[in-house]
Amino acid sequence: MRLRPVIAFILGAALTGCAANNANDVDSRRTGSGVDRVSPVRAAEVNTRLGVGYLERGELQVAMQKLELAVDQDPKHSPAHLALGVVYQSIDRDDKALKHLRTAVRLAPDDGGAHNSYAALLCQIGRYSEADRHFRMALEDPFYATPEVALANAGSCARRDGREEDAEDYLREALEYDPQNRTALFNLARLSFDRGEPLSARAFLQRLEASGGLGARSLLLAVQVERDLGSERDAERYAAVLTQQYPDSPQASQLRQQNQKRND
């Protein structure tokens, strides 16, 4: 099973206090009845830290065990529900993910990170209006440490919903906070290309490439942009990178289909 790309930004400011680096040290203290002697609230905090640590390392089964235990110990501990929602989302259990993320928002109604996480999943399952409302609530949190994340996600969601003007507004504002925000750069490139503006799309892709390279989605878009501009050499260069680095990706398969149609 794979962690979805959305996981990276879900583990944002709302969990900062739980992602301590000493997770293994804390875990070692659980031998015997160490945690059993402390209050359920404290035990839930410990297990949440552990669960988040395992989640960030991709150890999902252990993460789930720790976080389920944390929720049992303190059903009102919002970070435990938030992290558990992430775990369930990563294994395609969107029903349970929604339940726990919704609970996290209910328990921490002013937490921008929780609203951003919940909104991201709502968008993923096509509930765009609800998602936008929660993205806006995330941005209303004056203590939310990464507003560019919510802005970029809101822009991506608006683009999927066909609200191009809203999408561009969100995405450009995200870049004001972080000029190298990869979600914003990719979506602005996609938006530009869909509008018939390949030169603008190329510029955003160049910025994206400079900020850390291109993934499968952006490589396929780069091929399409360069072909639209008549630059077959650059298109072939991007195509070669896509097929060599991501041979089993849906984008590589889509490229092969496009090439077949071009050759027919």
Image (tube, rainbow, N blue to C red):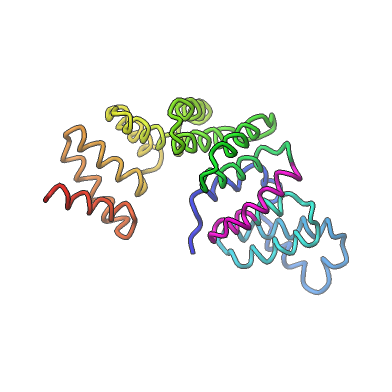
Locate residue 57, reporting x and y percent.
56, 59
Locate residue 136, reporting x and y percent.
61, 31
Figure disc tally: 0
Residue 246 is drawn in which quadrant? Answer: bottom left
> Which residue occupies the foreground of this view, 149 or 92?
92
Q: Please, what is the dominant secondary structure of the magenta stretch?
A: helix
Query: Does residue 3 lie above or below 8 as drawn?
Result: below
> Which residue occupies the foreground of this view, 217 or 124?
124
Q: Is residue 69 left or right of residue 124?
A: right
Locate residue 170, reporting x and y percent.
50, 28
Q: Is residue 260 left or right of residue 30?
A: left
Locate residue 262, reporting x and y percent.
15, 47
x 71%, y 63%: residue = 68
x 61%, y 40%: residue = 116
Q: Residue furthest left?
A: 264
Query: Does residue 72 lie above or below 233 as drawn?
Result: below
> Which residue occupies the foreground of this view, 124 or 78?
124
> Which residue occupies the foreground of this view, 173 or 43?
173
Residue 55 is drawn in which quadrant? Answer: bottom right
Q: Is residue 19 visible?
A: no
Residue 34 is drawn in which quadrant? Answer: bottom right
Q: Is residue 35 left or right of residue 219?
A: right
x 82%, y 56%: residue = 42
Q: Is residue 210 visible?
A: yes
x 70%, y 44%: residue = 105
Query: Does residue 237 lie above or below 83 as drawn?
Result: above
The residue segment tinted magenta is: 85-108
Query: Does residue 129 lie above or below 4 as drawn?
Result: above
Q: Residue furthest bottom?
A: 32
